[in-house]
Image (cartoon, rainbow, N blue to C red):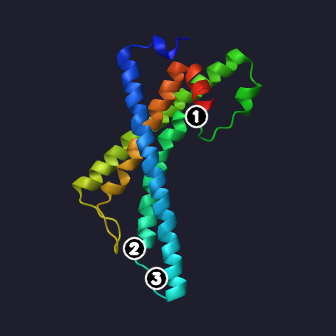
Amino acid sequence: MPSKTDKPAWWRACTAAHDRVTRAGFALAMAMLLVIVVSYCYEIVSRYAFDAPTLWASPLVSYSLVVLIFLAMPELSRGASHIAINVLIDAAPPALAQWMRASVRVVAAGACFLATWFCVDESLRQYASDIWTSPPFALPKWTVSMFIPYGMASSGLYFLRHLIDEPAAVLEVQT
């Protein structure tokens, strides 16, 4: 297998940019986690200590959770940190295990890209139809759902990158 230095300069530049965007997205996802924790804590204190529940905490947490999940997902795919059940792959002979890993990555990338297509279509439909989330903290629905195709597409790219760079990429990320 070729090493990372055997790749053309354009490939290295594109993958480095993809990794930077992914890390920035992951940092934003962690900020969304902080927003969720602070909002819920504020809601609990407000509701039970002051008998003054908020109208905004629950929707904010819901919207932030979508952003968190789909901004964090590419980082998990980049580091091969996603959930995987490898019983069959671990028990298989090395050549078969490599073929199985490659097959899983192809299927995973295909599933991610198919989901991206559906989600882009739905986000565009929400935009064109001017669909909003429910009050009292209403937003245009596409502003929340646009994070879903980003996460799916970026994860799909990482599955393809692992397929191309295997085994070096996964081993380098995990060490």
- The amino acid beneath tag 3 is Pro
Cα distance in 3D space between marks 3 and 1: 41 Å
Residue 71 visible in the shown view: no
- Tell me whether the residue at label 3 lies in contact with that at label 2, contact meaning CB atoms closer than 8 angstroms: no
- The amino acid beneath tag 1 is Ala
Residue assigned mark 1: 80
Rendered image quadrant of residue 54: bottom left
Residue assigned mark 2: 56
User: Residue 2: percent from the left, percent from the top?
Assistant: 52, 11
Q: Residue at x 49, y 67 (%)?
A: 38
- The amino acid beneath tag 2 is Trp
Front-most of 5 and 79?
Answer: 5
Q: Earlier in the sequence, mark 1 or mark 2?
A: 2
Cα distance in 3D space between marks 1 and 2: 36 Å
Q: Earlier in the sequence, mark 3 or mark 1?
A: 3
Residue assigned mark 3: 53
